[in-house]
Image: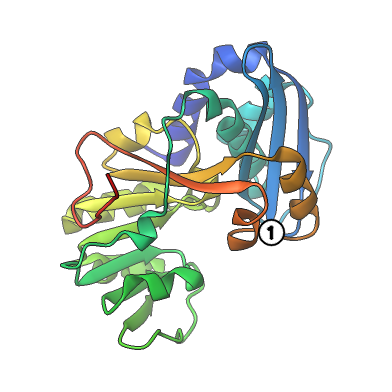
Amino acid sequence: MPAGDYLARVADHLAERASEATDARVTVGERALLAELTHPESGRLAGLAHRPEGEMRAWPTEPSELAALAADATDPLSRAVGVAALNALSAPEMAWREGDPMASLSADVDVVATVGLFRPALRKFGAATVRVVERDPPESVEAPSGATVTTHAPGDCAAAFADADVCFLTGSALVYGGFDDYLGALETAGVSTVVLVGATASHWPEPAFERGVSVVAGARVVDPERVRERVLAGDCGTDLHDNGVQKVYVVGPEGAPGLAFDA
């Protein structure tokens, strides 16, 4: 399922809620963006996404039009704005649990693959071998003590995924492209647990689970006003988790071997 079709399915599922919502607002910072809207039953809703490069424009003020950008936009920035709107619209029905799957590796995990370079998370992987797939991979990555980190271009993802126990796939692949290709390569490699991770991935998870994702790990906005301020200040990721955002996750029906969550 290409990313456009995947996001169109999410948008279709949320269409009724989008049609009932009003007062869409978009805040674009240097590294993250925030979509907010008001729903008559659920109140003020907010969703985050990674901020790609791109030209600013006047964003739609109707939530339905804003959400449609996720599947219909042809540039990454507009697509990311649409995804943030889907994340906001998904909030009322998300059965999130608070926690961080990246900090939940089982002791028997030997090889971790990531799509995206999650530098702050490397120390959470202990002594596991970590293989990082990046659109523009650095020549080397400073590895925490006891760990081995290698970098790979997207064309080398088969080697990166071989024998991996767990893969953390950035939700930004929905914006930049490659989402379906990565999932196909992970399936071919037989990776048992795939975690779709990041603020961009914080929406209705059923299509992801059907496509082989084990866990969706996202970001729940609990203080939209504070988050708006920090997005404008240039924060993203870890900085936002200290300022109105919670790390959350939901596990799919097939479970997640290699991850040990608290009961």
Few, some or many C-alpha atoms within 10 Å of disc 1 (few <14, some 14-19, many ≥20)? some
Q: Quadrant of residue 31?
A: bottom right
Q: Give percent across and percent down for residue 23.
A: 78, 22
Q: Is residue 72 left or right of residue 57?
A: left
Q: Give percent across and percent down for residue 72.
A: 60, 32
Q: Give percent across and percent down for residue 59.
A: 79, 34
Q: Secondary structure at mark 1?
A: loop
Q: Quadrant of residue 255?
A: top left
Residue 113 vertical placement versus 205 (above, below): below
| Closer to the camera in the image, 13 or 102 | 102
| Closer to the camera in the image, 59 or 192 | 192
> In the rendered view of the protein, which quadrant contains the N terminus?
top left
Residue depicted at 21% across the width and 50% down the height: 187
> In the rendered view of the protein, which quadrant contains the C terminus?
top left
Callout 1 amino acid: Arg
Q: Is residue 8 left or right of residue 104?
A: right
Q: Which residue is mark 1?
A: 31
Q: Give percent across and percent down for residue 9.
A: 45, 25
Residue 168 vertical placement versus 216 (above, below): below
**Could one spot residue 55 in this view of the protein?**
no
Residue depicted at 41% across the width and 75% down the height: 123
How many numbered badges does the structure rendering display? 1
Residue depicted at 47% across the width and 23% down the height: 93
| Closer to the camera in the image, 160 or 24 | 24
Q: Quadrant of residue 88?
A: top right
Residue 145 vertical placement versus 155 (above, below): below
